[in-house]
Image (spheres, grey):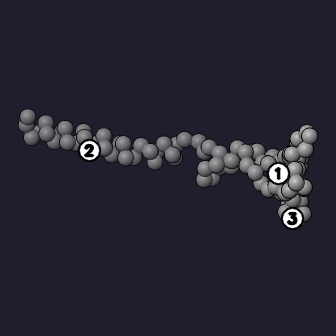
Amino acid sequence: MTLHDGLTACSALMFVIVLLVCLKPLLKLVSPQRGGQKGGSAALSLVGQMALDRTRRLSVVRYGSREVLVLTGGNQDVLLEWQNEGGAFAAALEEAS
């Protein structure tokens, strides 16, 4: 093996190492944001909740840019979707508690 072959093999090995080290940050820059990561919104998140009595609980759940009000714990769970966007349920729940 000559010096030229050794340098070529060494530079090829260095290229592979640099590619492996730089591949993860490059994929983070190129890949779309998933829910829950920095800069993205979670697909489903619990905004707030309040206990109404021993068994029932009132919760505000956000999915995307929409909010829903969920009443759980009784004989039947109730889901109320709000047409107006802008955190109306969360603000009302914060005022009540």
Question: Percent x, y for residue 34?
Answer: 62, 43
Please tell me in which quadrant of the rendered image residue 49 appears.
Answer: bottom right
Q: How far apart are the two marked residues, 1 and 2, measured between alpha carbons?
A: 53 Å
Residues 73 and 14: in front is: 73
**Which of the two labelled residues, at mark 1 and mark 2, occupies the earlier sequence position?**
2
Please tell me in which quadrant of the rendered image residue 87 appears.
Answer: bottom right
Question: Percent x, y for residue 40?
Answer: 65, 49
**Which of the two labelled residues, at mark 3 and mark 1, occupies the earlier sequence position?**
1
Whether residue 88 is visible, yes or no, is no
The tag on residue 60 is: 1
Residues 76 and 7: in front is: 76
Q: Residue furthest top?
A: 1
Q: Residue at the spot x=83%, y=51% of the render?
A: 59
As shown in the figure, which amino acid type bears the numbered disc 1? Val
Question: Percent x, y for residue 72?
Answer: 86, 45
As shown in the figure, which amino acid type bears the numbered disc 3? Ser
Task: Name the secondary structure under disc 3.
Answer: loop
Mark whose residue sits in front, 3 or 2: 3
The tag on residue 97 is: 3
Task: Name the secondary structure under disc 2.
Answer: helix
Q: Residue at the spot x=88%, y=50% of the render?
A: 56
Name the image quarter holding the C terminus.
Answer: bottom right
As shown in the figure, which amino acid type bears the numbered disc 2? Met
Task: Name the secondary structure under disc 1.
Answer: strand
